[in-house]
Amino acid sequence: MAFQPQNPDYRAFIEQIFRAQPFMMALGAALERIEPGETEISLQIRPDHLQHGGTVHGGVIVALADNGAAAATLLPPGQAVVTAEYRISFLAPAVGHTLLARGTVLRPGRSLIHTKSDVIAVADNREILVATALGSMVPFAFNKP
């Protein structure tokens, strides 16, 4: 579905709010793609992202999946989003060198924006779907960072 952004500077705004998230910066997450209703975030897997079994910790996967950047691409100037709820399904162990979180808007709305995020592990030039999340994002008035 083709969405029309309400903010002509939506890409710059998404980059600004992403950089203003200390937790995402500490993880080492990076924005790779920003389009109306779609984003992609990458993460180079480090040893401190792993759990005791040697795969990426579920908390890292959730952090990538629970990012409202795709929803925020459709907002008017002066608004951002927070998560109202999400459900995540872990589908495979996350191993490899990179994680990608591909966020998409399923249905925009004034009070809730429904989203989907697929988290993919990249290893040996193969992509493995490791988790899928469905979420609801709530727009709110936002005057900084």
Image (cartoon, rainbow, N blue to C red):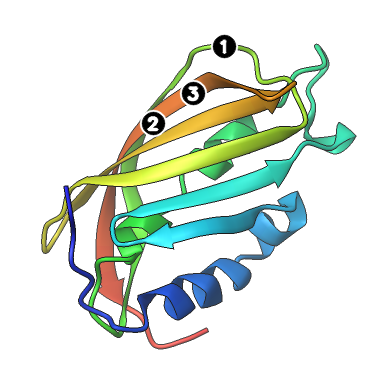
Q: Which residue is most to the right? A: 47
* 82 lies above or below 50: below
Pointer 1: what residue?
92
Looking at the picture, how far across and down is residue 54, in whole percent?
A: 82, 16
Looking at the picture, how far across and down is residue 39, in whole percent?
A: 43, 53
Q: How crowded is mark 1: few (under 14 residues within 10 Å), some or many (20 or more)?
A: few
- What residue is shown at x 52% (from left), y 40% (from top)? 101
Q: Residues within 10 Å of mark 2 (few under 14, many from 20)?
A: many
The numbered dot on residue 133 is: 2
Q: Which residue is most to the bottom? A: 143
- What residue is shown at x 78% (from left), y 36% (from top)? 45
Q: Distance between the residues labelled 1 and 3?
A: 7 Å
Q: Which of 26 and 6 is in front in this view?
A: 6
Q: How far apart are marks 2 and 3 (CA)?
A: 7 Å
Do labels 1 and 2 touch, CB within 8 Å? no
* 23 lies above or below 74: above
* 94 lies above or below 14: above
Q: Distance between the residues labelled 1 and 2?
A: 14 Å
- What residue is shown at x 32% (from left), y 45% (from top)? 104
Q: In this view, does 17 lie to the left or right of 22?
A: left
Looking at the picture, how far across and down is residue 122, in whole percent?
A: 66, 27
Mark 3 lies on a secondary structure that is strand
